[in-house]
Amino acid sequence: MQKRMFITGIFFVAPITIILAIFLFFPILQSVYYSFTDWKGVGGYSFVGFSNYLDIFNDESFTNALKRTLLIGIAAAVLTNLCGLLFALMLDQALKTKSLLRALFYIPNVIPIVVAAFVWRYMLDANSGLLNEWLSKLTGDRIAIPWIDSPDYVVYSIIAITVWQMWGPIMIIYLAALQGIPQDMKEATMIDGASKWRRFISLTLPMIAPGITVNVLIGLANGLRIFDLPFALTGGGPAGSSETLAVKIYRYAFSSTELSLGLASSFVLTICAMVVTFFFIAISRQYEKGVM
Amino acid sequence: MSMKRAQKLVVELSVILLALIVSIPLYLIAINAFKTHKEIVKNPLKFPSFEAGFENIVNAFEKMDLIKSYGVTFSIGAIALVIAVGLGALAAYAVARIKHKFFGSLYWVYTSAILIPIQSALIPVVFLLKDLHLQNTILGISLMYAAILSPFCIFMYAGFMRALPYELEESAYLDGCSTTRTFFQIIFPLVLPVTASLIIVQFISVWNDLLLPLVVLNSTDNPTVSISLYKFFGGRGLTDLSLLFGGIALTLLPIMALFIGFQRYFVKGLSAGAVKG
């Protein structure tokens, strides 16, 4: 019986595992392998050791893109979680308009990024944009901050738009986690007379800990691989100041002379994603162990 | 009591205000699709006088060749999701229910694949598709999406299936049901809500994706909706806002209809898998 089940199980996992192996796992290994060569996509190649890696790390536009990607990934993960949790806590108060509000908060996530990029570009335009117009009215001065067209601001605009775009699913997961807290536990702490903040720290937070883990991972995963938004919003500009690793890889990949640099960069991106993720999982395991 | 009620009202009003603020982009799209370029420039937030009627949308429709891109994008999403969801559910059942070390570690392989950015595999995959004669084909890009999306499907399904009581299957086995039959007749019907939400959420992510069609497809032969939009905006700048907003409204319409129609599945499925997993 056990053995038969094992064999059936193999048949169950085989099809998708084969597709994953062909289109994901094997190419990743290939990518790593070729990143140590001067492969140009066609013809022969020879091993060049770490020279591709030295090249990209000596290229300031790459190291800047790397730092920027880490900043966007971490900031997006933290901020989307704060916003998502805040909205979930507010919606959890049994509001009358709950389902409508939930939909409004979620909708940014279903708007195509290309569309979002255009509408935000229109709203954040330095001269005719709505945001500057409102700020001008509010302060009485004429304000013309180049939110998107200046290297100083563009990264923050990208983070803000990403947060707006990602908080929907995160809020939903928190809402579900909050609704999973047993009513009698809530009542027990209320009878104890614990303050709201105390209740949040000692009851709510530990109870939704698994939700936090999943949500931060979603935030990190989406933030670190971000491509569509910078590409559609600015094309990586002005002067490369909003290029993320993913955009950089795309650019390398489409120039045959730098293909191997693209491979090296994609391995760096993979390592970053792995390191940040495992670091975070280790922390959250510690926390969950500590409170449970 | 009335103190509490007043407090609740304040919370509710502030949430409504917040929701309205974050919905400004959506509002802009909805109203400006019905305004002339002049009207938009003059006062973008004003409610339309409907002078332009549906002209913007009709204009955009004629210029964008949308029918073709709708068809292409829909086919890609459909093929990718049938594979990712169907085969993903099968695999999830094995890793969630068969108590064996092998399947236990396989679960972690799938789960860690969620975190791998597609860029890590992208360049070799492009050459692989060439070798397989799948470059610039709907099947090729769909297989790539299936590989990208299935780990998350497996993760969600496995989380949900683990929470199902074992008695269900035990009684089926006692009746002489095979594992395969048990899966199709007992387990799969139970995970339909997760299936529905996975299909919707992932379909939207395929519909909105820019990277893969940019890399794998030729936009004249196989235009996807986001690529058409991207080209549509790229060539124009901000000189004809009414046409742009018309185009946006047009591409947003099916997604919004899908979202509003299936809203409860978004909520149910996302929460079911993620929290229990």
Image (cartoon, helix red, strand yellow):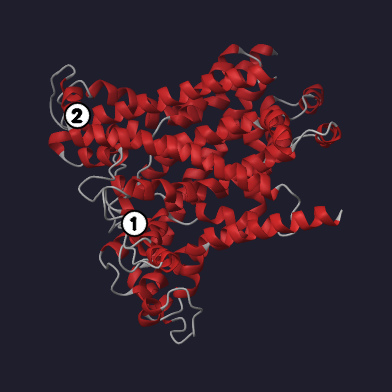
Q: Residue furthest front?
A: A140
Crowdedness near tag 2: few (<14), some (14–19) or many (≥20) residues, C-alpha within 10 Å: some
Which residue corresponds to the image point at 43% horizontal and 74% vertical from the top-left? B44
Q: Which label sits on residue A39?
A: none
Is B14 placed left or right of B165 in the picture?
A: left
Chain letter of the residue carrying label 2: A
The answer to whether residue A89 is above or below residue B242 is above
The residue identified by callout 2 is A56
The residue identified by callout 1 is B227
* Quadrant in the rendering for residue A202: top right
Which type of secondary structure does the marked residue at label 1 adopt? helix
Which residue corresponds to the image point at 44% horizontal and 38% vertical from the top-left? A75
Which residue corresponds to the image point at 74% horizontal and 59% vertical from the top-left? B9
Is A68 placed left or right of B181 in the picture?
A: left
Relative image position of residue A183 (x, y in whole percent): 82, 37
Crowdedness near tag 1: few (<14), some (14–19) or many (≥20) residues, C-alpha within 10 Å: many
Q: Amino acid at mark 1?
A: Ile
Which residue corresponds to the image point at 35% horizontal and 44% vertical from the top-left? A227
Is A22 placed left or right of A37 in the picture?
A: right
